[in-house]
Amino acid sequence: MSIKNSITTADALTWDSMLRLVRSLYRDGNYRLSLFVACASFFGLRASDVLRLMWSDLLDGETFTITEKKTGKRRIIAVNKQLRAHVLDCYVRLGEPEKSEPVFRSRKGGIYTIQRINVLLKEAKERYKLEIEHFSTHTCRKTFGRELVRLAGANSEMALIKLSELFNHSSTAITRRYLGLRQEEILECYSILSF
């Protein structure tokens, strides 16, 4: 639960910062959190959907299908080859659990909660000195969107159309605002003036 009058929006990480975090967590033996950040950032899923992933989803094929918890919408997710290699490394380091088990099983046997992941992310922010103000599970989803827009370059409008559908937004204007692009565009108005 958030504190009254507090900002509850998440900021995006740069893609390079996200990858450094994933690698640092892995290097330090924090394989599940490394996997969470990687999967959430590469798939663009909400934390509630990432936490429901099974090992078989990530290891048994090039794609898997998920029904989003919030929207009930079915999505087919492709597992990037480089991400698959990271997943396999973590799987081996975690003792090769049964593929029918949840990926994000806690030491106590349950599934990590979003609140617990947020606590772990805030600890990681401090430990790895991440330059981000509002860091939470939703950061990864925004990182995914921002990176796709950045990679699209001149075709960023097409990327926004695809993201709008993927995020189940009613318009690209909402996607722009969601990713913080609209605010950046507005702030640019001030920098073009000369003195």
Image (cartoon, rainbow, N blue to C red):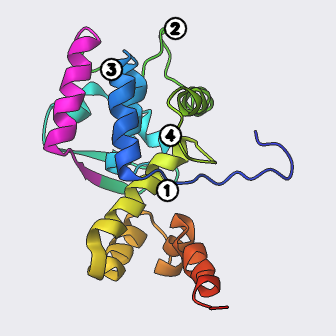
* Label 1 residue SS: loop
Q: Is residue 92 left or right of residue 156?
A: left
Q: Residue at x 43, y 49 (%)?
A: 68
Front disc: 2 or 3: 3
How packed mark 3 is, by other alpha carbons closer than 10 Å (few <14, some 14-19, many 20 or more), is: few
Which residue type carries mark 3? Arg
- Lower position in the chain sequence, tag 2 or tag 3: 3
- Residue at 26%, 53% (x, y): give it: 76
Expressed as whole percent of the image width and height from the top left, the position of residue 186 reads 61, 82
Tag 2 and tag 3, C-beta contact below 8 Å: no
Does residue 172 appear to the left or right of 162 in the view shown? right
> Mark 1 and 3 residues: CB-CB less than 8 Å, in contact?
no
Q: Quadrant of residue 144?
A: bottom left
Secondary structure of the residue carrying numbered label 3: helix
Disc 4 secondary structure class:
helix
Q: On residue 27, which mark appears?
A: 3
Residue beneath disc 4: 48
The tag on residue 108 is 2
Q: Residues within 10 Å of mark 2 (few under 14, many from 20)?
A: few
Image quadrant containing the C terminus: bottom right
Viewed as shown, does residue 134 lie left or right of 124?
right
Label 2 residue SS: loop
The x and y percentages for residue 153 are 29, 75
Q: Residue at x 54, y 34 (%)?
A: 129
